[in-house]
Structure formats: C-alpha cells, structure tokens
Amino acid sequence: MLTCIAAGWTSLLMLGGLLRFAIFVPLGIYDGYAQNHWNVIKKNTQLQGGLYSPSIAAGEKIAAKWGRFAFYWSFAAWLPSVFVPPPVNIIFGIIDFVIAIFISIATHHQTGHVPHDIKHCKGSGAHSFQLPPGANESFFEAAARLNATATNPFHMCKSFVQEWRYGIVISIFYSAIALFSIIATASICLFSYREAHGMSKSFFELMLYGFINLPKYIGAFIVAFLYYIPVIFFRCLPISVKSKVRLVRRYGVKAGQGLEEKGEMQMHALKRKIERKGETDKYTAKELGEPTNLGEFLSIYDVLIEVVQHLHYVDVVNLGLVSKSVREAVLPADEYEQRMTHFKMYACHNKGKKQCWVCNNQICRSTRCKYSRALKQTTLYFHLDNCRPYCTPCYLSTVHSSPTSPSTLPPTPRNRHMDTRICRCAPVTATPNILQRYLNSTAYYSSRQTQLPYIPRSVCRECNVFTDKGLLERRETRTKWELKHGGRKEGLKCKGCEKILGGGPRWWVCRGCKRECRSWVHGAWGSSKSKGGDVEVVGEQAV
C-alpha cells in the first residue's frame, strides 16, 4: 500500500515538473509581451485612463509583475518541486495557485479590451475596435504612436492578442500544476491519518516525524543539485571544449591508477622477497649428480644440437629431467638462458612455431606437439585477445574522431573529438563485486557464464593432460600479468603506428568496435623500459 501511494504522488509531482518545464518558453514570451506593454502604458499617462479604460493598465501591471515572477519561479522551483516530498511540497502548490490566480485576473482585465482573434486586428480593425466616443484613435493606435520603438497599430493589436492567449494557457497550466501538488499532499496526509490509527499514534506524531526527517530530503536534494547542475552546464559546452576536458580527466584517472599499480607491484615484490628469503629466480645447479654415458654424450654441444633438431621443444625440456648429470649437460646453470634460446631455434618444425597458450613451452604444427582445446572465452581472455594499446596521437585519431561514427570518418583536426562511448564487448565477469551484485543480482552474472563462447586454443603436450577448468586456472595468473604489464608482444608496440610505447598512459582500444576499453584489468601506465633495454620514447611517440 505504501509503495502504491508513494508511486502515485511521485507520478503526480513528475507530471507537474514536466508541465512546468513545458511552459518555460511560453512564460518567457508572455513576460516579454507584458513588460513591453506595461512600459508603454507606464510612461504615458493618457493610456492609463481618461479616454481609455483603466482596467487595461491594471491588467498589464498585474501581468508584468506576476509574469516576471512566474518566469523566475518556474526555473527556481522546477527540480525542487519534483524531489521535495509531500506534505512539504504543498508550499510549491500554494505559490503556483497564487500565480495562476493573478495571471487569470490579468487575463480577465484584458478580455473585454483585446480582440480574441488576430484577424480582427487587420485592416481597420485596430482602429475601430473599442474606439472611445469622440476619439480619433483607438488604444492600439495611441500605444503604437507613443511606443519608443517603431511599430504600427496592427502589430500592437496583434501583440495584445498573443499576450491574452498566452495568459489563458499559462493560467490553465499553473492551475493544473498546483492541483497535482495539492492532490499529492492530500493523498499522503490521508494515508498518514489511516496509518496513525493503525499504529495507535496520532496524526500529529506522524506528521512531526515527517518534518523531523525533512532535513535528510533537503540534504539529498542539495547534493543532487550541486552535482547535476555542473554536469548539465558541462553538457551544454561545445564538443571541442568537452573533448579536451575529458581527455585531461582520463589522463588524471590513468595517472592515479598507475600509481596504485606501482604500489601494488612493489608490495608484491616485497612479499615475494620475504617469503622466498635466500632463494633466487635464477637456476643454479646444487648437485651435479652421478656421471652417466648419456650425460657425457650430450655434453658435446654440436652433438646436443644435432639431437635437438630431431626433437620437439617439450621433448628437450623433458630430456633435462632424466637425471642431474643429463640436466647439467643439456641446461648448464651458467648458460641456461642461452641454451633455452637455442633450443627454441632448433627444436620443432621451422614453420608454425609459437608459444603454448597456457605455459612457456614452444609448440609447432605437428600433431604430436600442438593440441587444440576449445576453452571458454571469459572476461580476462577476451581482453587479452581483443584489446590493443595505442599511443596518444593514434588514440586521438582512432577514438577521438566523430562522436557519432568513430570508425568511418577519417581523422582530421575538425573531428578529433573524444567519443564518450566505451567498449562493452567483453562478457560479464564471473566474480562481480558488491555493487555489481546489488545492481544486477548474482543470478545475472552466473546465468551469463553459461552463454560464453568457446575459442580454440593451442596447447602443448604437457598442458593437454589438464581439464578445461585446470587449463583456465593455470592461464589466469599469467593473463593478469600480461594485461597489466604488456607481457605479450602485442602489448609493447602501438597498434596504430607500430612504434615502441614509451612511458606514460596506455590507451586500450577494442579491435572490434574501435572504442576505448576502460577495464581495470589493463595496465593504465607504462614505463619506458623494454626487453631491449632502456628505451626512452619522446615526441608524439611518448605516451
């Protein structure tokens, strides 16, 4: 019941706000006519009485005063009249009702002295309408003659007719707005009265409780007002100005996100150092083991390379696990990195070499080396496959083009405006946060996990033994690192100009829709270091 009542008075107030918005322009026109007419009459005493009816001047005075008040009141009360709940909203209804009464009075004064149709002003109509006995000119002719601006009796008569018509419309609209406010207040008071009897409380106590909570509503309105007014003002600015402001804001957001990522990496490195105290990431041979004939045979480098040329990379790695002596012969501690590079060069077939999707093993096109597995395209892997980094100039050319068609118009200085639309191609996450669960419910996210497409992935022989779930879990940690740090080859160069990315913000753009991806799984800020050493990129290449 309470929900129905609340929905009822909310609908009435929303309808009143819509009507109030609809009469902004008519009120402005009415106020303009009333001010012009009253200024002419006020400056010329012969138009205020004597030959002409004094009710004309009285009506124009009321119209000028209350038309101006109604115009400013409509702007000031538009949002508050919608958000302030009854019974406090009755204040707006009373003022609206008073405005409707005074504009009706002004219109009533004009009814007997103004034609009701513009066609009565044409020809001699402006001269003959309400012409006083013994007078040479009508009120409209006298007003046109005494007007400070050049005009004629027809246009003066026409302006009075239009003011009279607008007065009727505005008085009707304001009466309806006041009626909606009164009905909303009456309904909530009636409901409160019934609730008071049901709760063994007096109507006065319930109303007092409502007034005590009034500051909360006022505070919420003030916060909303202070937030939305700048937003509305910003939306009215030229697109060129808004584009620059939005780009600066995005720069600031990425800078803050980059600082957060840097702190997170430093904490992770410190934690890893504490947990692995005394250990090193570099391979060291602790024991050489017992010498074997195979170890001695493979210790000859040329012989080892001849053997490797007939093996797959996974076989070479497994060969180093036969014994300690064989491992030292195949992968000596002082040449570990160099040997791994050579093995990738000589092992497997020359064509079709690539990295296993899950681990670091190299695979080739051989059916004994590469295995295809259809795995779910979850959120992380979608970003890994479809999002590419751009430098700032290429980002401006790709995303900062036309706000209506960013992918079809050529990038020029005239259409380099920021497209505020963002990429929404990625599937929903399987682990929503509290806010996401509150807005969409947990069932929304869980149900969409069953609709994810399956993408074929190439894995090595070692990884092929795992289940689909196991493969996705093993790949997740590496995927997060690659997304944050650009660990893949595609994350080191700009997709647009193919130049090495320098230090600065990383602009990630979806390959499909050509819009910016703002997911926090991507690294927001990059350093100027690359695998080849310290590379500092300046000028337009710097991001």
Image: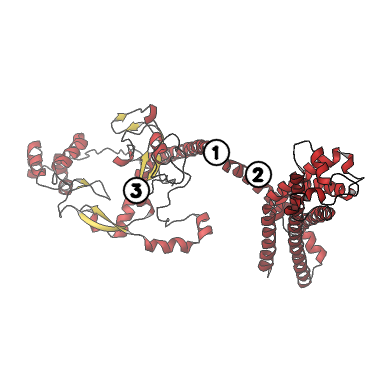
Pointer 3 residue: 386
Identity of the residue furthest to the right in this view:
50
Q: Earlier in the sequence, mark 1 or mark 3?
A: 1
For the residues labelled 1 and 2, the Cα–Cα distance comes to: 22 Å
The kind of residue on which mark 1 rests is Pro
Instruction: Tell me the element at label 1.
Output: loop
Judged left or right of residue 135, residue 99 is: left
Compare residues 268 and 56 and report the one nearer the observer. 56
Does residue 1 sit above or below 248 in this rendering?
Answer: below
Residue 188 picture location, percent across and down? 74, 65
At which x and y percent is residue 84? 72, 55
Amino acid type shown at disc 3: Asn
First in residue order: circle 3 vs circle 2: 2
Rounded to the nearest whole Å, what is the CA distance between mark 3 and mark 2? Answer: 39 Å
Image side of residue 257 versus residue 48, left or right:
left
Q: Residue at x 14, y 52 (%)?
A: 366
Disc assigned to residue 226: 2
Q: Nearer the viewer, mark 1 or mark 2?
A: 1
Q: From the viewer's perspective, is residue 62 above or below residue 203?
A: above
Label located before the other in sequence (1 or 2) = 2
How far apart are labels 1 and 3 at the CA level? 33 Å
* Residues packed near mark 1 inside 10 Å, few (<14), some (14 to 19) or many (20 plus): few
Location of residue 277 by image quarter: top left
